[in-house]
Image: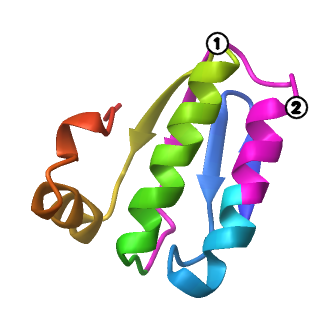
C-alpha cells in the first residue's frame, strides 16, 4: 500500500474511498516512525485511481508531516487528483516536488 525507500514514500494502491482509512493510517505510521528525514517525497507514480477521498488523505498526511517537522512534497500526482484539488479550491495546498 505504501512503500518506504530512503526519503521517499511510494503509494502503490488506488486512492479511493474503500482504501482511504488504510492509506491514512499507513501514511501516518510512516510519518510518525522517526525513520524519515526532514524532507520526504510522496511519490504517486503507481496510483492508478483516485477519488475525492484522496485529497482528504493527502491533506491529513501533510498535517501529520508538519506536526513532526517533515517537509512533504508530492511527485507524479495523477492528473485527476490535481483536477479535483482545483475544483475544490485546494490546489495551492498541494506541495509539488
Q: Quadrant of residue 29?
A: top right
Check disc 1 and report the residue beneath it: 69
Residue at 71% of width from left, 16% of height from top? 37
2 or 1: tag closer to the N-terminus: 2
Task: Identify the mark at residue 33; answer none if there is no mark.
Answer: 2
Against 37, residue 9 (above or below) is below
Q: Is residue 27 left or right of residue 59?
A: right
The quadrant of the image that shows the C terminus is top left
Instruction: Out of 56 and 16, give the one closest to the viewer.
Output: 56
Q: Secondary structure at mark 1?
A: loop
Q: Is residue 71 left or right of residue 85?
A: right
Q: Is residue 95 left or right of residue 63?
A: left
The crowding category of the residue bearing disc 2, from other C-alpha atoms within 10 Å (few below 14, some 14 to 19, many at least 20), is few
Q: Position of residue 68 (x, y in %)?
A: 70, 19
Instruction: Out of 34 and 97, give the one closest to the viewer.
Output: 34
Residue lying at the far bottom in this picture: please name it.
Answer: 18
Q: Position of residue 26 (x, y in %)?
A: 77, 56
Amino acid at each position: 500500500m505504501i512503500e518506504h525507500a530512503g526519503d521517499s514514500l511510494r503509494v502503490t494502491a488506488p486512492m479511493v474511498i474503500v482504501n482511504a482509512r488504510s492509506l491514512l493510517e499507513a501514511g501516518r505510521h510512516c510519518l510518525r516512525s522517526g525513520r524519515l528525514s526532514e524532507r520526504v517525497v510522496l511519490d504517486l507514480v503507481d496510483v492508478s485511481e483516485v477519488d475525492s477521498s484522496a485529497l482528504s488523505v493527502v491533506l491529513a498526511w501533510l498535517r501529520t508531516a508538519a506536526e513532526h517537522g517533515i517537509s512533504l512534497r508530492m511527485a507524479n500526482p495523477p492528473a485527476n487528483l490535481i483536477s479535483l484539488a482545483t475544483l475544490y479550491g485546494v490546489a495551492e495546498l498541494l506541495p509539488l516536488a
